[in-house]
Image (cartoon, rainbow, N blue to C red):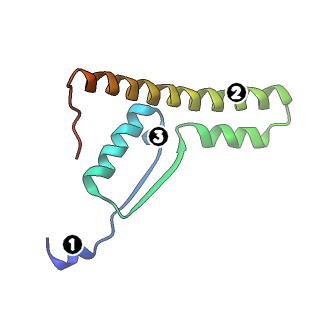
Amino acid sequence: MNQHQKNQIIICKFGGTSMGHFRAMFKSAHIVLKNRPKVIVVSATSGTTDMLTSLISTTQREKSLNICSQVTKNHLQILDDIQDFFLQKKNDQNKNIIYYQS
């Protein structure tokens, strides 16, 4: 690695489909681990910005509640997927299955 490469700052920005669901987040995490960026920027999950924009622009209570419900549902699904992953990983470790770590 030359001096110029040592001084470079790597910036990784993830948002939208990169944060759309747990598998996409996991893939983004691997990119971060591989590149060792100095700056990591993460924005809203896929569709969230559009839903929040709709929420701000609507005056209908029912539509507002539906949007809030959908944002909550999407994030709870991601949390469920994360929990399932780590429970499976824990079970696999008990079976001596090793996951790649960079």
For marks 3 and 2 on the same chain, the one whose residue lies earlier in the sequence:
3
Q: Is residue 33 above or below residue 24?
A: below
- Gap between marks 1 and 3 measured at Cα: 29 Å
Tell which circle, 1 or 3, labels the residue nearer the N-terminal end. Answer: 1
Q: Residue sitting at 62 percent across and 26 percent down?
A: 73
Q: How many marks?
A: 3
Query: Quick one: label 3, few (<14), some, or many (20+) residues within 10 Å?
Result: many
Q: Position of residue 32 (x, y in %)?
A: 33, 51
Q: Residue under circle 1? A: 5
Query: In the image, residue 14 lies at what x, y percent?
Result: 44, 49
For label 3, the residue is 19
Judge whether 70 appears above or below 38 on screen: above
Which residue is labeled 2 in the image?
69
Work out which quarter of the rendered image holds the N terminus and state it. Answer: bottom left
Sort mark 1 into few (<14), some (14-19) or many (20+) by Cα contacts within 10 Å. few
Q: Residue shown at 23%/20% (left/top)?
A: 95
Q: Looking at numbered disc 3 in the image, what kind of residue is underneath it? A: Met
